[in-house]
Image: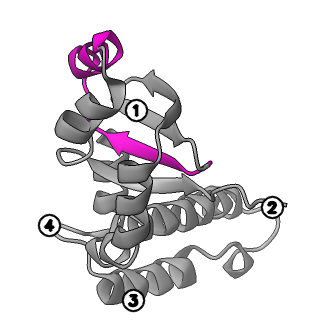
């Protein structure tokens, strides 16, 4: 959640993420912080390089959790969570990363250690996740599913 709030603050997003507004703000920030605007040797050039990387990362991250993006990928996500089992999972801080049998990986934000421990102690991992994780947390797809050869 810290990462989400940090990027929202960078882009001036207060509530819902709208792709058109996000794109406009992204372009303005990139123009403002583009490293080519600064001469070699200027202290601001190094800062501009760091800031431009942060802007690019933040833009791609916010696009991936935007309601429009989630809505457009909802069918594939529903297929994955309903028909694919959990192949692997990792929890760090408040982030739960689940890799499914089909090879796709999703990150769930704000998952507390208590919820994670309930999940791993559950005798039916998929059932617990369907009831307690998938509908309750912001998520994004992080890796493409593996294509069969």
Q: Are marks 1 and 3 in contact (CB under 8 Å)?
A: no
Looking at the rendering, in which quadrant would you find the N terminus? top left
User: Where 25 falls versus 149 (above or below)?
Assistant: below
Q: Which residues are magenta?
A: 103-122
Which label lies toward us, 2 or 3? 3
Residue matched to label 4: 15
Earlier residue among tags 1 and 3? 3
Residue matched to label 3: 24
Residue matched to label 2: 41
**Image position, residue 98 (x, y; %):** 47, 37
Distance in Å between CA atoms under marks 4 and 2? 39 Å
Q: Are marks 1 and 4 in contact (CB under 8 Å)?
A: no
**Image position, residue 76 (x, y; %):** 44, 67
Residue matched to label 1: 96
Quadrant housing residue 130: top left
Q: Secondary structure at mark 1?
A: strand
Which label lies toward us, 2 or 1? 1
Left/right placement of residue 116 relative to residue 98 reads left
Left/right placement of residue 96 relative to residue 147 reads left
């Amino acid at each position: 959640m810290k990462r989400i709030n940090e990027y929202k603050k960078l882009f001036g997003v207060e509530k819902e993420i709208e792709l058109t507004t996000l794109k406009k703000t992204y372009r303005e920030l990139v123009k403002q912080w583009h490293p080519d605007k600064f001469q070699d040797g200027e202290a601001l050039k190094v800062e501009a390089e760091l800031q431009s990387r942060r802007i690019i990362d933040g833009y791609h991250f916010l696009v991936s959790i935007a309601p429009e993006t989630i809505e457009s990928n909802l069918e594939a996500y529903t297929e994955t969570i309903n028909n694919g089992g959990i192949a692997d999972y990792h929890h760090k801080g408040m982030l739960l990363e689940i890799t499914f049998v089909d090879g796709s990986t999703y990150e769930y934000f704000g998952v507390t250690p208590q919820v994670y421990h309930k999940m791993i102690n559950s005798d039916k991992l998929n059932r617990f996740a369907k009831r307690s994780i998938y509908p309750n947390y912001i998520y994004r797809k992080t890796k493409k599913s593996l294509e069969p050869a």
